[in-house]
Image (spheres, helix red, strand yellow):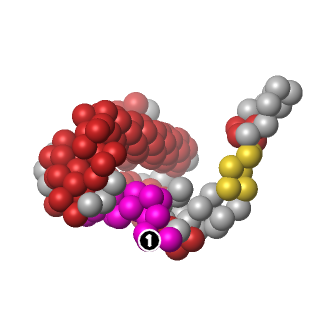
Amino acid sequence: MYTGDDKKFDGSELYLSDAFEIKEFMEVKVRVLRQEMVNENSVLGEYLCFIRLLKKNMAIYATTETAVMETIKSCKEYGILSDYLREREGEIANMIMEGINIEKLIGTAEENREEGREEGRKEGEVLMALRFVSNKLKQGLADNYILDDLICSFELDEYVASAIIQKAKSEY
């Protein structure tokens, strides 16, 4: 059951072997069910209600644990997966919190990776600008011409461009 917002999962079939290079041993094929394909009165429908409530509670409560426990409490009160939740409440709570924590870690890693890329791009741009200024200084151009050229070529504000010129002069 797919409960996310990505439209690429449209009830199509997915193959586990697509995730691996070696495809010799066994094939697992699954059919992705979207929310709108499920009967609300079925166990899967109850699971959908549980997930919807969990998502709402995640936005309301400060901690994951509180959101999960409130979701379980509400579902038991309203008869949503109530027998299953009564029998395995601790196990379900731990499993959900672990899954959410893993998702957060993955999201944090992806954010950190993107921040690192952006930082690398900026450092690269600064190095290019320093080389640009060094070449202009070697040509004997005046600071005001270099400043205008640097602002136009690298789309920098005047303060940053002036700082780069000063840095280039100190290294030149």
Q: Let me know if residue 56 is in the magenta part.
A: yes
**One can see residue 79 in this view:** yes
Residue farthest toward the front in the current orientation of the protein: 83
Q: Which corner quadrant of the image does residue 87 belong to? A: top left
Q: Let me know if residue 40 is in the magenta part.
A: yes
At a point 22% along the width and 54% down the height, the residue shown is 76
Q: Residues within 10 Å of mark 1 (few under 14, many from 20)?
A: some
Image location (x, y in percent) of residue 150: 45, 58
Front in this rendered view, residue 162 or 39: 39
Looking at the image, residue 140 sits to the left or right of residue 77; the answer is: right
Q: Which corner quadrant of the image does residue 13 belong to? A: bottom right
Front in this rendered view, residue 22 or 13: 13
Looking at the image, residue 60 sits to the left or right of residue 101; the answer is: left
At a point 52% along the width and 58% down the height, the residue shown is 2
Q: Is the magenta stretch mostly helix, strand or loop?
A: helix
User: Quadrant location of the C terminus?
Assistant: top left
* Mark 1 lies on residue: 40
Q: In this view, does 105 lie above or below 14?
A: above
Range of residues picked out in magenta: 39-57
**One can see residue 105 in this view:** no
Q: What residue type is labelled 1?
A: Glu
At a point 50% along the width and 71% down the height, the residue shown is 39
Front in this rendered view, residue 41 or 98: 41
Q: Which corner quadrant of the image does residue 166 belong to? A: top left
Image location (x, y in percent) of residue 171: 40, 31
Front in this rendered view, residue 9 or 68: 68
Image location (x, y in percent) of residue 22: 81, 27
Q: How many numbered discs?
A: 1
At a point 13% along the width and 50% down the height, the residue shown is 62
Image location (x, y in percent) of residue 68: 23, 47
Q: Is mark 1 on a helix, strand or loop?
A: loop
